[in-house]
Image (cartoon, rainbow, N blue to C red):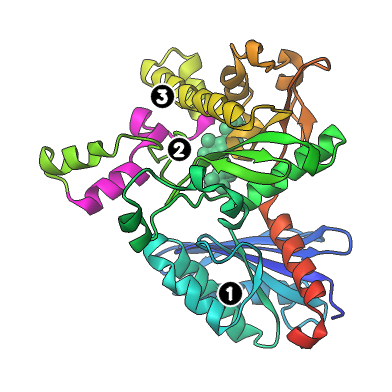
């Protein structure tokens, strides 16, 4: 295999995000997004490393049209999909169930298994499959690699992965805790070890991935031992629009007493709950602006968000026994100093302290925000899921050797 470029695709139901990376130096050659696929007012934004960003609005009826539009933009920059420099395409796939514990070169059996998992990931896996099939049609000769959001969590022990419900019923329907955001938790836990100047095998980390979706994980010596998302991404922390943990009886109550259907409650808990349900906003910048202006609903939403976060820090501290670092990542974790400060406030007894000055400094790279003599490091570690997908994809196609891939 001669090429050193990897195209990373993150295909959602109505959007495709892409990045073209050069794995010789980790350089990003182009980054882009096609939005509102199959809807009115589709939009493409394409940013090559060596040039001006370009945007257009037009009709993008389906994923095939979206990837062709992406390919045309890459062609304009001399980075087309036909280039021999392209080594592989890496796809983010949300649900890999128990079977996919590693990145996997896609073949018909792999596609069939991703399809079989649709009942546990009805929103995500169909879109991921469409992305893979469309990319295959564009470059049938190229290895397509699936990198699973669940893979990093497959090391969880049964005690963390099982719900305490009847085992036969759970197994019949593949009900268990799978966890998501695994690519980010893997990358960030490794980068945290690097920031501490230690080997990942020697370090225990609590990773707090706080984006619009949010999850926490407990990572012991580089292996995930617990994570806050479960069968679906609904469990765990308070998120932008998801409730996180609730008593399951809330659902029966809303059905029996509130007269709501399962689909209506699904939408309520996934789309109209969390921060947006509590205060009408899901952007932490806006919530903080309102809190600072004395808005009580925003204040309560912030407090509920922080209370849940703190509970998970405490829980994972207990799960790990010894914690070397707590790492904040993703949109909120990387940017919101008030969230980081509030999440750790009062945890001095656990060795967790944030230095106000360091916390307030904005920066792009991984950095410590705890005092130099702190017992537990508190860090901001920017996530880079595309780089991790590209690195895993590239490593796999190189390792697999030419016999499988040419
Ligand atoms: P996702 O990938 O889950 O959509 P991101 O990791 O991009 O989410 O995070 C998006 C969220 O990050 C926004 O909804 C907003 O709440 C938060 N965010 C982004 N920038 C800032 C900022 N400067 N300060 C506080 N919060 C921010």
The nearer-to-camera label among 1 and 3 is 3
Instruction: Determine whether label 3 and label 2 are within 8 Å by CB.
Output: no
Q: Is residue 122 shown to the viewer in this render?
A: no
Of 223 and 284, nearer the camera is 223
Q: Sequence order check: which comes first, mark 1 or mark 3?
A: 1
- Quadrant where the image shows the N terminus: bottom right
Vertical comparison of 153 with 99: above or below = above
Image quarter for ligand 1 equals: top right
Residue 15: x, y in percent? 51, 62
- Residue drawn at the location 69% of the way across and 27% of the way down: 322
Vertical comparison of 27 with 214: above or below = below
Residue 183: x, y in percent? 64, 53
Crowding near pointer 2: few (<14 within 10 Å), some, many (20+)?
many
> What secondary structure is found at the residue carrying circle 2?
loop
In the figure, is residue 372 to the left or right of 74? right
In the figure, is residue 16 to the left or right of 74? left
> What secondary structure is found at the residue carrying circle 1?
helix
Vertical comparison of 372 with 190: above or below = above
- Residue drawn at the location 60% of the way across and 78% of the way down: 135
Residue 293: x, y in percent? 47, 14
- Residue drawn at the location 30% of the way across and 57% of the way down: 169
Q: Which residues are magenta?
A: 261-285
Q: Name the residue that disc number 3 marks.
A: 301
Mark 2 vs ligand 1: CB under 8 Å?
no
Q: Name the residue that disc number 2 marks.
A: 236
Q: Name the image quarter holding residue 32.
A: bottom right
Q: Name the residue that disc number 1 marks.
A: 67
In the figure, is residue 187 to the left or right of 237? right
Q: How far, Cα to Cα, is label 3 from label 2?
A: 16 Å
Q: Sequence order check: which comes first, mark 3 or mark 2?
A: 2
- Residue drawn at the location 84% of the way across and 76% of the way down: 3
């Amino acid at each position: 295999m001669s090429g050193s470029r990897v195209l990373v695709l993150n295909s959602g139901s109505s959007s495709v995000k892409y990045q073209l990376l050069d794995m010789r130096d980790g350089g990003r050659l182009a980054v882009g997004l096609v939005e509102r696929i199959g809807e009115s007012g589709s939009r493409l934004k394409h940013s090559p490393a060596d040039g001006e960003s370009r945007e257009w609005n037009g009709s993008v009826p389906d994923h095939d049209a979206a990837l062709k539009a992406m390919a045309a933009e890459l062609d304009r920059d001399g980075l087309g999909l036909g280039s021999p420099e392209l080594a592989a395409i890496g796809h983010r796939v949300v649900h890999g169930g128990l079977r996919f514990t590693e990145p996997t070169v896609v073949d018909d059996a792999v596609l069939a298994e991703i399809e079989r998992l649709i009942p546990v990931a009805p929103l995500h896996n169909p879109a991921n499959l469409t992305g893979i099939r469309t990319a295959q049609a564009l470059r049938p000769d190229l290895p397509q690699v699936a990198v699973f959001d669940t893979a990093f969590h497959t090391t969880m022990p049964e005690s963390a992965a099982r719900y305490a419900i009847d085992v036969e019923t759970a197994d019949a329907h593949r009900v268990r805790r799978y966890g998501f955001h695994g690519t980010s938790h893997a990358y960030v836990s490794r980068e945290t070890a690097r920031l501490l100047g230690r080997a990942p095998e020697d370090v225990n980390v609590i990773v707090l991935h706080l984006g619009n979706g949010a999850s926490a994980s407990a990572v012991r010596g580089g292996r995930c031992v617990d994570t806050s998302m479960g069968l679906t991404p609904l469990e765990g922390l308070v998120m932008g629009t998801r409730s996180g943990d609730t008593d399951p009886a809330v659902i029966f109550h809303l059905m029996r007493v509130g007269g709501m259907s399962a689909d209506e409650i699904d939408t309520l808990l996934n789309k109209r709950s969390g921060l947006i349900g509590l205060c009408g906003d899901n952007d932490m910048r806006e919530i903080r602006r309102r809190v600072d202006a004395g808005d009580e609903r925003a204040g309560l939403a912030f407090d509920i968000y922080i209370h849940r976060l703190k509970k998970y820090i405490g829980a994972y501290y207990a799960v790990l026994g010894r914690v070397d670092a707590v790492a904040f990542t993703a949109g909120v974790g990387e940017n919101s100093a008030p969230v980081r400060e509030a999440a750790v406030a009062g945890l001095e007894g656990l060795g967790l302290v944030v230095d106000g000055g360091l916390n307030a400094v904005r920066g792009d790279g991984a950095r410590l925000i705890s005092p130099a003599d702190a017992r537990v490091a508190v860090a901001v570690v920017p996530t880079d899921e595309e780089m991790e997908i590209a690195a895993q994809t590239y490593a796999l196609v190189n390792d697999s050797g030419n016999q499988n891939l040419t």
